[in-house]
Image (cartoon, rainbow, N blue to C red):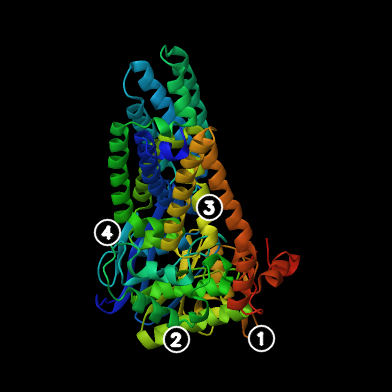
Amino acid sequence: MTVDAGANVVELRAASLRYGARSLWDGLELDVARGEFLAVLGPNGVGKTSLLRVLLGLTPLSDGRVTVLGRPPQRGSPLVGYVPQQRTFDLELPLRGRDLVRLGVDGHRWGFRRPGRRAALADAAIGAVSAGDYAAVPIGRLSGGEQQRLRIAQALVSDPTLLLCDEPLLSLDLSSQRLVVDLLDARRRERRTAVVFVTHEINPILPFVDRVLYLAPGSWATGKPDEVLTGDTLSRLYGTSVDVLRVRGRVVVVGAPDEPDTALGEAGHAHRLSGDPEGGRP
Amino acid sequence: MSFAELLRQHFVHTALLAGGVTSVLAGAVGVFVVIRGMSFAVHAVSELGFTGAAGALVLGIDPVVGLLVGSLAVGAVLGALTVRGRERDSAIGSFLAFGLGVGVLLISRYQGYATQATNLLFGSIVGVSDRQLLVLAGVAALVVAGLAVAFRPLLFASVDPEAAEARGISLRLLSVILLLLVALTTAEAIQVVGVLLVLTLVITPAAAATRLTARPGVALALSVGIAAFATEGGILLSLVKPYPTSFFISALSFAAYVAARGGTAWRRTRAVRRAVPPTSPVPA
């Protein structure tokens, strides 16, 4: 594969990550182009969040090479936005949504605040995610969907070229999921921001995803959703018979071993199916 | 002596100044303590400051020096242990218990005036000397400067650690910085209200303030204001009625907290109803 260093936002070559004796992924090859929407799928504990931490420059690779925007990942780079896994904010936390977004502008800076565009930048980012109505409400009082929109505003306020999202749809209702995904999709279309989206629920984002990176214990696969989310590929990844069903435009994985989180479809249905003796389990 | 005469006394002025200086520190640092849920760590730093002071008494040096050394040492250790702002109860409890045991031993070996030990436990603001006031002011200047410089990273790391880390902030460094500021603040507050009542200045005002506002800066100012109200009010009340100053301070501080709880319950409910459309569920 020929590599044009300027073309890709993310490049991983023969990348491996190990913690002690435990290997998370090995020989990983990945390119993410500008404006591309990459979904990172896989069961818990295969190193999805660790991959994001590598791209953030917080965790070094055990082996191989990684570049973000043509350079080794820079810790705290404003060119990389991050939407961390949702955590609940304390009800009494003295912080408004607006303050959360403002921290994205200059929260990492020491010393006294320089008068500047901080408020204007934050307000613009809040406007872009249509969160103006509740930007002054204590953050702990907002719904999960509202908090998540503000987190996206915080991540986008530095105008990043790469946006990393860790399970951003977790515990959101369907309409909030829709809103969040639409926001991300609009952003990458308008500003060509590459989106790396860690999830174990592919269906809400399936129409928008360009490519999938599927991490399984000990192996991985990458390609278009139709190439990766097949019985053959997943059976190879898991080393056991796995079926992928397409039901009314949704993907349901049946038979991935022992991992409730591998249910790519509506979790409840897939669970019941995977518990079924006819579901292909050994 | 009448109240008016007392107000002209030098020791009263010194006490009011020392109280004011301490309130600024305790109120400001307290906001971060409350946000990060580390009240227990403050309690530990305070009680181990007592151990340091008891050690100083036995060695025949200024107990304030022992106090500072003790709290700073513990603050540094706890800061390194509590990276994500979540205190580890069991670790802190273990340190605390052993340190106090050592403190008991030291006090039992101390042959001097028992009042010095009592003052450490229950506070002695009306006994603050001019020299002590100078030390208090010097330490206060250090803490205020530290807070001013670290304010934004400290807030970011406290309310949103994952995002803060992604923006290049070292959570461990900030945890250590905060615990060192807490240690210095605690050493000051001990001289005003005593080891056992440090929380009344470091926790209660901030807990009240964070109920009154959702703006970080305003919360800080309110917290300082409430701490000052309790401290200065407590000192003045103790001139009128000869109960321990620490009692009055804790009573006023607690009154402010109760008022903040009660007074905001209905206001918050109303504000939320106004701000959030009824269709969006508000998480409990």
Q: Which residue is mark 1?
A: A248
Q: Is residue B234 above or below residue A99?
A: above
The residue positioned farthest toward the bottom in the image shown: A190
Chain designation of label 4: A
Q: Residues within 10 Å of mark 2 (few under 14, many from 20)?
A: few
Chain designation of label 1: A
Q: Which residue is mark 2?
A: A186
Of B164 and B103, the residue lying toward us? B103
Q: Residues within 10 Å of mark 1 (few under 14, many from 20)?
A: few
The disc at residue B207 is 3
- Which mark sits nearer the N-terminus, 2 or 1? 2
Same chain? Circles 1 and 4: yes
| Kind of residue sitting beneath label 4 | Gly
In the image, what residue occupies the spot 47% across and 14% down?
A: B108
Mark 3 → mark 2, Cα distance in angstroms = 41 Å
Q: Position of residue B40 (x, y in %)?
A: 52, 41
Asked if disc 1 and disc 4 are in contact, CB closer than 8 Å, the reply is: no
Q: Residues within 10 Å of mark 3 (few under 14, many from 20)?
A: many
| Kind of residue sitting beneath label 1 | Arg
Mark 2 → mark 4, Cα distance in angstroms = 36 Å
Is residue A11 in view from this perspective? yes
In the image, what residue occupies the spot 48% across and 71% down?
A: A97
Q: Quadrant of the C terminus of chain B?
A: bottom right
The reply, left or right, for residue A202 in relation to residue A35 is right
The reply, left or right, for residue A15 in relation to residue B259 is left
- Which mark sits nearer the N-terminus, 2 or 4? 4
